[in-house]
Image (spheres, coloured by chain):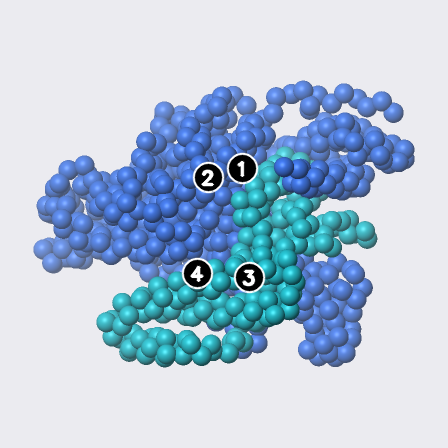
Chain colours: A cyan, B blue
Amino acid sequence: MFCPHCNALLCPPGGYFEIFGMEPRLEIAREDLERRFYQLSRQLHPDRFARRPAVERQYSLDAAAILNDAYRVLRDPARRAEYLLNEVPAAAGDRPPVPAELLEEIFEMNMAIESLRGGDQGARPQLAAAQERFLSMRREAGQALEELFDEFDRTHDDAVCSRIRLLLGRRRFIENLIRDVEKELAR
Amino acid sequence: MPLVQIDHLTTKRPCVVGIDLGTTNSLVACMKGAAPQVIPGEDGRNLLPSVVSYAEDGRIRTGNAASELLRSEPRRTVYSVKRLMGRARADVADELALFPFHIAEDSDSIIELELGPRRFTPPQISAFVLNELKRNAERWLGEPVEQAVVTVPAYFNDAQRQATRDAGRIAGLDVLRLVNEPTAAALAYGLDKRRNGIVAVYDFGGGTFDISILKLQDGIFEVLATHGDTHLGGDDIDNLLLRIALEDIAQEWGEDLAGSAEAVQLLRQRVVAAKEELSRVPAVSLHFEWRSRKYEREIRRPLFERLITDIVERTLDSCRQCIRDAGAIVEQIDEVVLVGGSTRIPLVREAVERLFRARPHTELNPDEVVALGAAVQAAILSGDVEDQLLLDVTPLSLGIETMGGVVSRLIRRNSTIPASATETFTTAVDGQTNVLIHVLQGERELATDCRSLARFDLKGIDPQPAGMARVQVRFLIDANGILSVTARDLHTGREQAVEVKPSYGLQEAQVEAMIRDSIDFADEDLRARLVREARLEADTVLAATGKARSHEAYGKLAGHERQAIDLAASELLMAYHSDDHRLIKAHIGKLNQATLHLAGSMMATTLESALKGAKIE
C-alpha cells in the first residue's frame, strides 16, 4: 500500500476488495464487510494516532481516508457493481437516456414542478408522492440488481453482465429524479 | 550508543480537556476515573457565559464579569460571537442590526469587531473564552493544560471549523480534534449505556441546530447522516420576541428604542428571562422599565408557541431530511437524545417526541452533555479509552467549479471522514504552468449558490502543449472535517506546490500575529509560550521514538539507521531544556527525518496485521 518512490500511502493495486481482505465479488455479506470495516477503523483511525508524531498521524489519516472511500463504494450494491464492472458513472450534466416505462411518470413530475414554481402550493403533495414512488423504484431496482449478483459471481456470463449494466443505468436515472424532486421540495 | 532513559515515558500523561465552545455558554470538562466531569470556574459555576468585554481600562473580561457589562458597556461587549465565526459581513447582515457592537465597515471577508479603539476578529474573541476555560481547568487540575478537544456544530462548514481551530491556537491550546456537538452528546450518553442500535441526537442550542443519526455497535459510534442549520437557535427566538416587544413599546410609548443599545440589551435580558420562565409555567409577565417609563405585558404559552412554530418546524424539516439521508425510517430509530438549552421548551420536546415516536432522553443536563462528550473524546485521543471510536461524517458536499460555473461533486455529504477524492487536471493553453482550482462546499448545482472555500493555485507545472499536462490533485477531508489539498505532476512525479487562498479565513501570518497579540492580554511571555509548545511536541516525538524501539520494524532497520535515530534523539534531549524554541524545533525536525523510514514500515506492519486480522474469522 506504499508508493515505492515517495513512501506515500496508496490504494493497494488489488483495489478496494483487497483492503478488506475479500475476494472481488458482487455479492458480499453486508455484516461481514461492516465487521471488517469496524475492525480496520479501530486500528487505523486518526484518533488512535492523535498523540503520535506528525509523520505517523499523516499515514493514519491517509490510510483511514482510503479505507473509508473503499467502504463507501463497497457497502452500496450499485456502486460496488459499478466499481467491479468498471462502469464509469455518468459525469455531472450527462443524462442517461430516459427509460420508456418512466416517461409518463416524468411528464407528471415535470408538470407538478412547473405548477409549484408557478406558486401553486397544491402541487407539493403531488410532488411528495412522486418522491415516494421514485424512492420505492430505487429500492426495487436495487433488489433486482442484487438478485443478479450471485449469478454473475458464479458464471461471469456476459448476458447477466449487460442486464446488470442496464439496471445500473436505470437506477442512476431514478437517483437523478429523486435529487430533482428533493431540490424542488426544498425550495 | 546507549540512550538516556527518557523521563517522558514515566511521567504522567498531561490531561486533554474537552471544551464546548457554545453560542451562549461555554464549558470545560475532563475525565475523572471512568466518568467525565464538568470543571467549575472560580465562582463555582459550570457555565461560562460566552461573553467578552474590552472595557475602558484596557482589560479583557470574560464570562459573568463581562455579562455584567452588557448593559453599561454594550458597544464594547460581545456575545454570541459563534454566529460570526468563519463568516463574511454579507452572511450576517440580517442579525447585525440587533447586535449592539460595531463591525468594522471595511472588514468584508473576515469580520472585525470594533470595541473601543481596538479591533478583534471572532476567533480572537472566542480565544478569550477558551483561555478562561483553560485557566479554570489548570486551577482545578493543578497542572498545565495545553491540549483540548473542542466541539463545533455538526453543520459547521470548513471556514467555521478553521476559525474555531484558529481560536484554539490563539488561546494557546493545541486542538487535537474538533468534534461535532451531537456526536459528542452521543458519546456522553453511550458511556453508561453501551447498547447497540440507532440513535438520533437533536441538538437545539443558542445559535445552531443539528440533527445527527448514529449507529451504535460494540463501542463504535458511526454517524449515518447529519443535517442542520448553523443559523437557527434560541437566539432566533430571542430576536423574534425582542422585535415584537420593541414594536409593542414603540406603539405604546411613541418612541423607538431600537437605536439605544443599552435599552435593547436590558429588554433582551427581560425577554430571555421570560422565555426561559415560560418553559416552566404557563404564563409570564414581561416587565421592562426604561427612564422611569414602564412597560408590562403578559405572555401566555399558547401565544409563545404560535410565535415559534415556524422555527420548530424548520428543525423538523432538517430531521426528516436527515432520516432519509441515513437510509432509515422513523421506526428504526431506537432512541432520541435531546441536547442544548432550547430543548427545554415544552413545544420542542413534544414535536420531537411526535416525529420520532419515542420518548427523548433528558437524563443528562442538556447544557453540559456536549462538554462531557468532548471529555470522552479527549480520553479516546489520549488512549485512556480504547474500546470506543467515533466515525463521523462531513455535513456538506465538496466540489470544484467546472466550465460554466457548474459544480462537480467530489465528496458527497454524509461521507465518513477522513474522506478523499482524486481528480486529474490539465492545461488549456500551450506552455501554461499553473492551474487555478476553485473549491466549494454545498449542495447546489451552481458555484455561485455554494460556499466558496478556497482557490488553490497549482504552480510550477512543466510547460507543455495544451491538454498534455497531467496534474493529479488529491482532496482530503480530515477527521476534523477540514480540507487539505495536495497535487502531483504525473509527468515528473513531483509533488506540486499548492498555494491556498482561503475565501473566508485567516492566513497563517494573521493567526501568528493574533497569537502575539493575545500574549499582551494574558500577561504571558511569548517566548515561554513558544518554548512550551516546542517541548510538548518534543515529548510526543521522543515518547513515540522510545516506544518504537520495541516494535518489530525497529529490529529490521539497518545499523546506520538506528544510529541516526539514537543520535537525533539524544540531540533533541540536549536541546530540550534550552529556552530556544527554534533549536528544539530544529531537532524535532531532525528526529522526524531520521525516523521517517521507521514510521513508514511500522505503519505498513500495522496495515498488514490489520488486513490479516480482517481475514481471520
Q: Residues within 10 Å of mark 1 (few under 14, many from 20)?
A: many
Q: Are dots 3 and 2 on a single chain?
A: no
Q: Secondary structure at mark 4?
A: helix
Give B617 or B321, whichever is nearer the viewer. B617
- The residue tagged 1 is B389
Relative to B86, does residue B127 appear above or below in the rendering? above
Q: Residue at x 35, y 36 (%)?
A: B367
Question: How far from the left and from the top, in percent, is residue B138?
Answer: 50, 26
Q: Quadrant of the C terminus of chain B?
A: top right
Give the CA distance from mark 3 to mark 2: 31 Å
Q: Residue at x 14, y 51 (%)?
A: B303
- The residue tagged 4 is A139
Give the CA distance from mark 4 to mark 2: 25 Å
Chain where mark 2 sits: B
Q: Is residue B324 visible?
A: yes
Residue B216 is labelled as 2
Amino acid at circle 4: Arg
Amino acid at circle 1: Leu
